[in-house]
Image (spheres, rainbow, N blue to C red):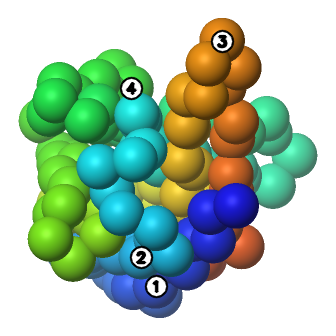
Amino acid sequence: QVQLVESGGGLVQAGRSLRLSCAASVSMLSINIMGWYRQAPGKQRELVAAVTKSGDTNYADSVKGRFTISRDNAENTVYLQMNSLKPEDTAVYYCKAARLAGLTVYDYWGQGTQVTVSS
C-alpha cells in the first residue's frame, strides 16, 4: 500500500505561482511513475504532469512551459511548481503513484488539494 498526502493548494490571483507537494509513505524508488492530475467541476480528470523513476517527464500541452514536476527521492516527495497560473487551472489536483509489481500496475491516489485561480 502507498499513501499519498498532497499539500500546497490555495487561492491565488492569475499570473502568480503555487507549489504543490505530494508525500509518499514508501520509498520513491519503489514507485515507477508519479503523476499530478486535476479535475475541474463538470470535467473529467486529466493528466497534468508525470515523472518516471529515471526522471523522464511528460506534460499536458496546456501547462507546458508553465508547470514543472520534480521528485525528491530522499524526501519521498514529488512537487508540482505552477507558474503563470490562469483561471482555467482552477481544479482539484490529485497526486498518483503507479507501482509495477510483476505484470500488474497498481495505482494509488491522494485525497486531492484545491487550487483556485482568480482573474
Earlier residue among tags 3 and 2:
2
Residue type at tag 1: Ser
Residue placed furthest toward the right: 42
Question: Secondary structure under badge 4?
Answer: loop
Q: How many marks?
A: 4
Upstream in sequence: badge 3 or badge 1 = 1
Cα distance, mark 3 to mark 4?
A: 27 Å
Q: Which label sits in the foreground, 3 or 1?
A: 3
Mark nearer the N terminus (4 vs 2): 2
In percent of the image, x 87 and y 46: which residue is there? 42
Q: Amino acid at mark 2?
A: Ala
Q: Which residue is mark 1?
A: 7
Q: Nearer the viewer, residue 66 or 75?
A: 75
> Residue 60: which numbered mark, if any?
4
Would residue 2 appear left or right of 18 to someone viewing this image?
A: right
Q: Are marks 4 and 2 in contact (CB under 8 Å)?
A: no
Residue pointed to by mark 2:
23
Nearest to viewer (mark 1 / mark 2): 2
- Vertical position of residue 43 compared to residue 96: above or below: above
Q: Which mark is residue 104?
A: none
